[in-house]
Amino acid sequence: MAIEMVDEFTSHRLNRQRKFPTLEQYDAFRLGTGAVDSICDLHQFMAGTKLPEDIAWAPEVMIMQREASIQTCVCNDLLSLKKEIRDMTLISLIPIHLHESDASLDEIVAKLAQELQRSADTFDATADGLRFKAGQYGKAVVSETNRFIETFESFQTGCFAFFAKSKRFRVAEDQLHDGSFSIPL
């Protein structure tokens, strides 16, 4: 909650001042918001998942949390651009990239789509590593670890579905039959 409030305060202050943060500054105050860490940390307690400590708090879990946060932020910033333009709140990845580079909007969107793919690949490889590590404890721990990993996956899928269907972003009508988007600005 405190991190989200810092993010909101920072975003609103920068919007009022009409200042763009650097990409590094944006990542520093944006990643970790959206309750990704809290939801994933609490899952094992709420769902009754029992994991050995070296699995529950493994470095792989921290990487998975970071990648889930990256995916949530990038999806949000891609699908909310129309809303951000409408509301004149332009502190998000696309305007910051436009401000910092000579790249076109299409190039930036393609770069962010590649970042989503890179993040998903990193997440999947890291999850496989966590499953392998859990294997030393036997099938029951592997099963619990799979449930734990599915929490991250369902959170990411749920966020994407929410962003895509949200009346706040108004992009549902811009989704094509193949699942991609063509969002007129």
Image (tube, rainbow, N blue to C red):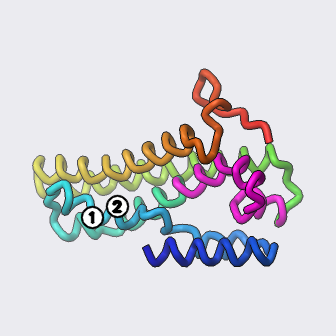
Quadrant of residue 22 in the image?
bottom right
Q: Quadrant of the C terminus?
A: top right
Q: Which mark is residue 42?
A: 1
| Label 2–label 1 contact, CB within 8 A | yes
Q: Is residue 100 left or right of residue 66?
A: right
Can residue 136 be seen in this snapshot?
A: no
Residue that mark 2 sits on = 39
Disc 2 to disc 1, how far (Cα)?
5 Å
What count of labels does the image hold? 2
Can residue 62 be seen in this snapshot?
A: yes
The residue under the point 82% across, 59% down is 98
Range of the magenta residues?
72-99
In the rendering, at what x and y percent does residue 61 appear? 34, 63
- Of residue 18 and residue 74, the one placed in the foreground of this image is 18
Secondary structure type for disc 2: helix
Q: Is residue 76 magenta?
A: yes
Magenta stretch, main secondary structure class: helix
